[in-house]
Image: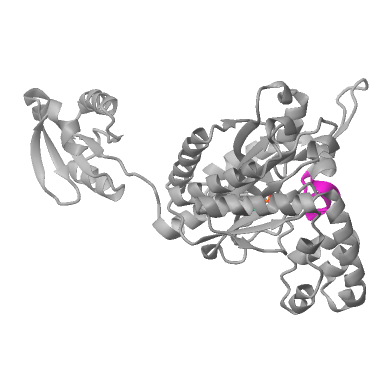
């Protein structure tokens, strides 16, 4: 109450600033998406939904809030995401009879999808489950260009029993080809597909041992992060970007030398199909990705325009994830596109996708709002984008507003126009003005 009183006092006081509360700002690492930028987001989302349809993917919507354990058991407790970046808290019981629970804002969506797959016994549905999602994810990272604490991902998963073909390398190749088509369709040029195989669990165990052994003698010369990772998660040493560490990392053992025969054959087949369908790729044996659940094919699409945070999307196979969450055997593969970064890349290459109004209707004189509203309704029904002015505006002000808001045409609605059924239509680009009959307006402006 006291705050409200202060606020009211402030607005009437001559010393306004003394009582004005500080404006509340958005939380660090989150941001408002405003028009016209949101238009580009909509263009992206419409394009991906249409493409997912073509590849027969259907939408899944899982909650933003999940049980913390879900991420501990899938993404992995030793990963940066779970150990450092989660927004998690203990949600205390509201009644004695209720149990408290640790909750987390989802930092990624594959774990949620696989949880839903298990919870709803989706393996009982025929064939492979091909699902996609679009939504916010949360990680407490240090914010910078292209890196936010609330960011958006567009992702998809193909998952199902092996008998439905979920392990086939052709699924990996199909997903990668779909992604290449998506970036091409959006007009994003100059992307690079980086590809690796991180092998199966056994391969990784042997590779981790080899890495640990090799790191023992050199890790003291490396950065603090590498020293920590060498103990907790040696694979992540390969992610290090510190220039001084690079010559050391180059000499470390390579994952490709530790793949068993089935993993090697699987990876070779993925590459063969990609080559056959004409999707270019670059092998990168340092690409390990930050999440524990990945097996075999791992990939990223990068783009030069993004600077330091250059991965526009990433993904891979996760055979074994379902089992680790208490589900049946259900190999799968998926990816997540960073929508913030995708939009950034698009804006850099083609500017804003915002579409201005076709017509600004300028009602001229008292009582004309009514006729303007009728005309706006008629035009909108014919697919014309209309902004409606107000009868209290002078003609000069209406035309200025129309120009400033980038409307393509201004339509003047005065008493004479309404009575005669002939309207003055001004092209705001050329300045040309013509008289058009009511029925002809839509055709003229489209
Ligand atoms: P990940 O789930 O880490 O594999 O990330 C997949 C994609 O999500 C990345 O390639 C980025 O494009 C995007 N991404 C991940 N973290 C962030 C973040 N903090 N801010 C913006 N985009 C992100």
Assign the C terminus to one quadrant of the image.
top left
Q: Which residue is drawn at 20% across and 24% down?
A: 371
Above or below — where is 17 with respect to 41? below
Decide if residue 367 is on the left or right side of residue 220. left
Please give the count of numbered marks on the rendered protein.
0
Q: Does the magenta stretch include residue 86?
A: yes
Above or below — where is 211 with respect to 442? below
- Locate residue 9, reporting x and y percent: 59, 41
Q: Does the magenta stretch include residue 367?
A: no
Magenta stretch in the rendered image: 75-87
Q: In which quarter of the image is residue 163?
A: top right
**Residue 85 seen in this snapshot:** no
- Between residues 425 and 37, which one lies in front from this camera angle? 37
Above or below — where is 171 with respect to 115? below
- Locate residue 116, reporting x and y percent: 73, 29
- Locate residue 300, reporting x and y percent: 63, 56
- Between residues 258 and 391, which one lies in front from this camera angle? 258
Q: Quadrant of residue 393?
A: top left
Q: Which residue is drawn at 50% across and 33% down?
A: 53
Assign the N terminus to one quadrant of the image.
top right
């Amino acid at each position: 109450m006291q705050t409200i009183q202060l606020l009211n006092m402030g607005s009437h006081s001559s010393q306004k600033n003394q009582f004005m509360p500080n404006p509340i700002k958005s939380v660090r690492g989150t941001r408002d998406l405003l028009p016209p930028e949101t238009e580009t987001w909509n263009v992206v989302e419409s394009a991906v939904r249409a493409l997912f349809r073509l590849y027969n993917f259907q939408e899944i919507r899982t909650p933003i809030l999940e049980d913390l354990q879900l991420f501990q058991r899938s993404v992995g407790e030793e990963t940066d995401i779970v150990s450092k970046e989660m927004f998690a808290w203990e949600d205390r019981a509201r009644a004695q009879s209720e149990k408290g629970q640790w909750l987390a804002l989802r930092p990624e969506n594959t774990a949620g999808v696989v949880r839903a797959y298990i919870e709803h016994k989706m393996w009982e549905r025929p064939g492979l489950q091909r699902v996609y999602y679009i939504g916010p994810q949360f990680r407490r990272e240090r914010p910078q260009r292209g890196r936010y604490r609330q960011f958006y991902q567009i992702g998809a998963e193909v998952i199902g029993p092996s008998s439905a073909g979920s392990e086939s390398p052709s699924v990996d190749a199909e997903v990668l080809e779909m992604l290449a088509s998506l970036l091409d369709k959006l007009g994003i040029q100059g992307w690079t597909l980086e590809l690796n195989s991180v092998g199966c669990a056994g391969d990784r165990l042997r590779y981790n041992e080899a890495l640990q052994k090799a790191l023992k003698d050199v890790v003291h010369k490396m950065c603090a992060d590498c020293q920590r990772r060498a103990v907790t998660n040696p694979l992540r040493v390969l992610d290090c970007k510190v220039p001084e560490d690079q010559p050391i990392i180059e000499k470390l053992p390579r994952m490709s030398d530790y793949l068993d025969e089935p993993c090697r054959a699987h990876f070779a087949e993925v590459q063969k199909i990609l080559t056959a369908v004409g999707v270019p790729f670059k092998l990168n044996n340092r690409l390990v990705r930050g999440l524990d659940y990945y097996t075999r094919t791992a990939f990223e699409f990068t783009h030069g325009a993004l600077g330091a945070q250059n991965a526009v999307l990433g993904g891979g196979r996760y055979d074994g994830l379902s089992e680790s969450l208490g589900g049946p055997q259900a190999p799968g593969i998926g990816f997540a596109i960073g929508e913030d970064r995708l939009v950034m890349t698009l804006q850099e290459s083609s500017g804003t996708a915002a579409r201005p109004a076709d017509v600004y209707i300028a009602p001229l004189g008292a009582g004309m709002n009514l006729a303007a509203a009728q005309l706006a309704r008629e035009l909108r029904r014919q697919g014309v984008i209309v902004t409606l002015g107000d009868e209290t505006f002078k003609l000069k002000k209406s035309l200025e507003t129309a120009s400033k808001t980038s409307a393509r045409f201004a339509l003047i609605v005065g008493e004479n126009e309404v009575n005669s059924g002939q309207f003055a239509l001004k092209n705001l680009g050329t300045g040309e003005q013509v008289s058009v009959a009511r029925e002809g307006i839509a055709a003229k402006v489209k």
